[in-house]
Image (cartoon, rainbow, N blue to C red):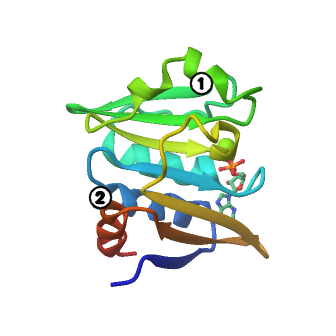
């Protein structure tokens, strides 16, 4: 009944597969923070996650738009990248709270930029560069997060 897991992804394809497997284990309302330096693989992971649930072909980095929306049936997926956010208060002006809830799944790159305004994470995934590959550490911040971690089989 652990609230933390670690995986290794040797290449981009494996990173996307980990994202897809997490998507399959996810539940509506889940908030996922993705941490790690530029180039760690946060967008790659998100791409695998989103492609597993949405049929739209391209998943682009939301670096300039702050958020990209996707539909998966009745569920919305919101992919945030807050790298270019000047101030967490800008998120208030965007009406960011409306994005979160049981109607959506949210993936957030650079969540530290939105501290104080973003809702807390159910799952925090920290990606680190290890040689040519990556390590992923995930920990649960809620009961839902813990349940999802237990179903995330890779
Ligand atoms: P971030 O969103 O964290 O800035 P990206 O997802 O854009 O990072 O990935 C940066 C680069 O890392 C891309 O070239 C991608 O192909 C590569 N990459 C992603 N995951 C892995 C992995 N597990 N092993 C090796 N390279 C990876
Ligand atoms: Mg990115």
**Helix, strand or loop for disc 2:** helix
Q: Is residue 66 visible?
A: yes
- Between the residue at mark 1 and the residue at mark 2, the CA separation in whole angstroms equals 29 Å
Quarter of the image where the N terminus is located: bottom left
The answer to which quarter of the image holds residue 133 is bottom right
- Residue neighbourhood size for the residue with mark 2, other residues' Cα within 10 Å, grouped as few (<14), some (14–19), many (≥20): some
Q: Up-down: is 67 above or below 111?
A: above
- Looking at the image, which residue is at 62% across and 52% down? 42
The answer to which quarter of the image holds residue 149 is bottom left
Q: Which mark is residue 24?
A: 2
| Relative image position of residue 21 (x, y in whole percent) | 37, 63
- Looking at the image, which residue is at 75% across and 52% down? 39
Determine the residue located farthest toward the bottom in the rendered image: 1
* Left or right relative to 17: residue 66: right
| Relative image position of residue 84 (x, y in whole percent) | 75, 30
Tell which of 99 and 8 is nearer to you.
Answer: 99
List the residue tagged with mark 1: 91
**Helix, strand or loop for disc 1:** helix
Q: Quadrant of ligand 1?
A: bottom right
């Amino acid at each position: 009944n652990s609230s933390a897991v670690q995986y290794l992804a040797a290449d981009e394809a494996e990173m996307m597969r980990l994202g897809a497997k997490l998507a399959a284990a996810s539940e509506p309302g889940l908030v996922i923070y993705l941490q790690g330096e530029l180039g760690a693989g946060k967008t790659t992971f998100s791409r695998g996650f989103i492609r597993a649930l949405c049929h739209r072909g391209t998943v682009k980095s939301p670096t300039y738009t702050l958020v990209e929306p996707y539909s998966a049936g009745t569920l919305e997926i919101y992919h945030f990248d807050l790298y270019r956010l000047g101030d967490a208060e800008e998120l208030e002006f965007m009406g960011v709270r409306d994005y979160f809830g049981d109607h959506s799944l949210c993936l957030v790159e650079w969540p530290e930029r939105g501290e104080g305004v973003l809702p807390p994470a159910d799952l925090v995934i920290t990606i680190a560069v290890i040689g040519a590959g990556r390590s992923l550490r995930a920990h649960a911040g809620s009961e839902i997060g813990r349940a999802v971690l237990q179903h995330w089989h890779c």
